[in-house]
Image (cartoon, grey):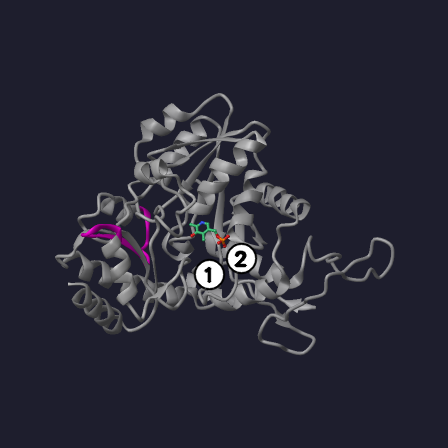
Amino acid sequence: MKKEIDTSNLEFASRCVHGGVYIDEQYNSVVTPIYPSSTFYFEGPGQTSGYDYTRTRNPTRDALEENLASLEGGAGCTATSTGMSAISSALHLLPENAHIVAGNEIYGGTFRLFNSIMPNRAMQVTQVDMSVLNAIEAAIRPETAAIWIETPSNPLLNLTDIEAVCNIAKKHKLLTIADNTFLTPLLQLPIELGTDIVVHSTTKYPNGHSDVVGGAIISATTEMAEQVAAMCNALGTTCSPIDAWLVLRGVKTLSVRMRAHEENGNALAKYLDQRPEIEQVYYPGLTSHPDHQLACRQQKGFGGMLSFDISGGEERAQAFIAQLSLYSFAESLGGVESLIEHPASMSHAAMTPEGLEAAGIKPCTIRVSAGIEAISDLIADMEQAFAAIA
Ligand SMILES: *Cc1c(COP(=O)(O)O)cnc(C)c1O
């Protein structure tokens, strides 16, 4: 029924547009149709079109999965209902009583899962400073089954050397799972660096328009991809056809949006870095960033996320945020509109005060997701906010 375009030799930008998008021979639709059908009829005993029930497999979701697998350089993908459902489904691949080594500073929802949900399900997590390779090795126990990688970290943009961590994991026969939400496959390819599984919140850059929640699990091997698909079917964590269609529509412009996010992120980091009110800017593109060299080596760009500490503590941080008009005061990231938030009370509120301190997240830390507006407008808005709180 459908004519596939061979996208395997195309450049990244072309694969964003054409990956998984089949030409519809029935009505010549250029865009992948939405198949909202929950079920598909059998032509006879055991005779299906390849689809029987949407939780298991759906043509619209298939299209998105093929696109994302191609972008990440993986063998297969399962698109899930949210980023957290991708993460919790991936954890179900680990054996009973598994122990995981993860970074100190990870996405707040992952922190909550690791610290308050999984320990009750006989799964233990040790969080370490992932930039200290000895600390990772020291945390490995006989029951350790996986290393969790999130780089750059959220919200302080610390980097983990993916290749070095994967080498440690291989030595100890551990699975590696990387959350690639912050950079997307345009700017970082964990599978190429040795990672077994990549997870995404497609809510963020892949969809890019702040109008859907979704996730994805991309596996390096076909065998792993099949296990993931079976797990997500069993757990019921796959995404709806309509959400899959929205993310597929968004991902077609990923390469151009991501370049614009990055350009603005870079310009905002440089602007903030020279403001007297700012104590520290966290952005891997700044030469002063402790992991700048690693970022140049491991990443194909520095991304659109940055954080900064403002002098005057939490009160001044909140006052600055309140003065802005172009930046929405909201959690999440990766949409075309710029967002600003206060990690300690919002995205990372699930962390304990000790956890926040260990991670280095201060009451005066502010996180920005640079949108794709004109940089002159983004800077002008900050300029007036600084003047207002002076
Ligand atoms: C948002 C986010 C998640 C969770 O994704 P949801 O779609 O909100 O469930 C996981 N990891 C990172 C790095 C995120 O930013």
Q: Residue furthest top?
A: 142
Q: Residues within 10 Å of mark 2 (few under 14, many from 20)?
A: many
Q: Quadrant of the C terminus?
A: bottom left
Residue at image point 56% right, 32% down: 120
Q: Looking at this rendering, what residue extends furthest in the right direction?
A: 45
Task: Look at the image and say whether residue 283 sits in the magenta stretch.
Answer: no
Indicate left or right for 10 with 370 as reference.
Answer: right
**What residue do we see at 52% from left, 69% from top?**
249
Q: Can residue 283 be spotted in the picture? A: no
- The answer to which image quadrant residue 140 occupies is top left
CA–CA distance between discs 1 and 2?
A: 9 Å
- Report which quarter residue 170 is drawn in: top left
Look at the numbered discs 1 and 2 and tell me whether their residues touch, using CB distance below 8 Å: yes
Report which residue position mark 2 lands on.
214
Q: Position of residue 152 (x, y in %)?
A: 34, 47
Tell me if I can see residue 309 in this picture.
Answer: yes
Q: Answer with mark 1 or mark 2, whichever residue precedes in sequence.
A: 1
**Residue found 39% across the figure and 68% down from its top:** 336
How many labels were placed on the picture?
A: 2
Some atom of ligand 1 lies within 8 Å of the CB belonging to the residue at label 2: yes
Start and end of the magenta stretch?
A: 298-314
Question: Mark 1: which amino acid?
Answer: Pro
**Height in image: 232 above or below 43?**
above
Give residue 207's position: percent from left, percent from top.
Answer: 48, 63
Please state which amino acid type lies under the numbered disc 2. Gly
Judge by depth and name the residue closer to the eye, 297 or 84. 84
Q: Secondary structure at mark 2?
A: loop
Residue drawn at x 53%, y 57% as measured from the top left? 214
Q: Position of residue 345 (x, y in %)?
A: 37, 50
Q: Which mark is residue 206?
A: 1
* Image quarter of the N terminus: bottom right
- Please tell me whether mark 1 or mark 2 is closer to you in this view: 2
